Image (cartoon, helix red, strand yellow):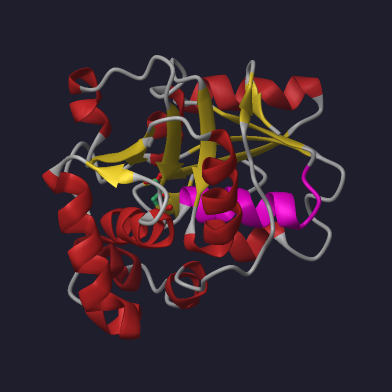
């Protein structure tokens, strides 16, 4: 039986061997939730990049450019990192290049894996179904915040473990801890996360609706996967 493991921060990735594995890259608030939303609203492909300048350069290839740093939309980019700004036809039929504080970094640092998929609560079931079909060992790579642990990505890892517990083994405490946290939180994740650092950070920026939105389960049947140099 294949196994699930959880890497709580991209800074810990050196402890994991990604070769031959499937990575689920996750940044619940908000990068991967936003990417899933973009695909659900018609984006054709997404280039996640680490640096602002690299992202800006994609404008020359006809891409929309999106950038966030410390929760705020970076100046002179078409879009920020709020999922709501990717709705209403804005990204329909378009390629998007995006850079965010932590999420795009987690994705790019996972490239050595056999398969990289983008996870969020919004597409949890699609991710779980895909992993069940693949039957590769799975590592959930949490974006965290600037190298540190965060609660919301860990809850996603626990939710995924919850979905897959009949079909995968957990050989590590990180997955068990994530599952226990998710079971404690799932009745009201919004309340559970109220004191968490990134929820407080976003609320200080007057970003409220995005938080509730990103905690919804299975809004979209969308599965962004990394292919060569982009998500499709
Ligand atoms: O860190 C990131 O990648 C972002 O998702 C953070 S924020 O939610 O846009 O502040």
Residue 81 appears in the figure: no
Front one among 18 and 195:
18
Q: Which residues are magenta?
A: 31-43
Q: Identify the main secondary structure in magenta.
A: helix
Residue 95 appears in the figure: yes
66 lies above or below 59: below
Residue 70 position in % (x across, y down): 34, 48
- Determine which quarter of the picture holds residue 21: top left
Q: Residue at x 77, y 57 (%)?
A: 41
Q: Is residue 52 left or right of residue 187?
A: right
Q: Residue at x 27, y 39 (%)?
A: 5
- On the rendered image, what quadrant is the N terminus found in? top left
Residue 100 position in % (x across, y down): 45, 40
The verdict on residue 137 being magenta is no
Front one among 18 and 135:
135
Front one among 81 and 149:
149
Q: Residue at x 39, y 74 (%)?
A: 206
Q: Is residue 109 left or right of residue 209?
A: left
Q: Residue at x 45, y 55 (%)?
A: 30
The verdict on residue 39 being magenta is yes
How many marks the image carries: the answer is 0
Q: Is residue 139 left or right of residue 95?
A: left
Residue 12 position in % (x across, y down): 19, 28
């Amino acid at each position: 039986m294949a196994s699930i493991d959880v890497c709580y921060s991209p800074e810990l990735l050196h402890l994991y061997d990604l070769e031959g594995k499937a990575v689920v890259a996750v940044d619940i608030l908000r990068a991967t939730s936003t990417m899933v939303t973009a695909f659900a609203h018609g984006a054709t492909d997404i280039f996640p990049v680490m640096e602002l300048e690299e992202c800006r350069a994609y404008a020359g290839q006809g891409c929309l450019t999106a950038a966030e740093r410390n929760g705020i939309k970076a100046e002179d980019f078409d879009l920020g990192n709020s999922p709501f700004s990717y709705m209403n036809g804005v990204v329909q039929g378009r390629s998007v290049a995006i850079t965010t504080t932590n999420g795009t970094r987690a994705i790019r640092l996972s490239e050595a894996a056999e398969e990289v998929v983008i996870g969020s609560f919004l597409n949890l079931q699609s991710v779980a179904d895909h992993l069940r079909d693949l039957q590769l060992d799975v590592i959930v790579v949490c974006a965290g915040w600037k190298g540190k642990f965060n609660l919301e990505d860990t809850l996603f890892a626990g939710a995924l473990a919850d979905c897959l517990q009949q079909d995968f083994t957990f050989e590590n405490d990180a997955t068990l801890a994530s599952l226990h946290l998710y079971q404690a939180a799932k009745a009201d994740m919004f309340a559970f996360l109220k004191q968490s650092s990134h929820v407080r950070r976003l609320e200080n920026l007057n970003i409220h609706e995005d938080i509730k939105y990103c905690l919804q389960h299975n809004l979209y049947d969308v599965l962004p996967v990394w292919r060569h140099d982009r998500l499709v």
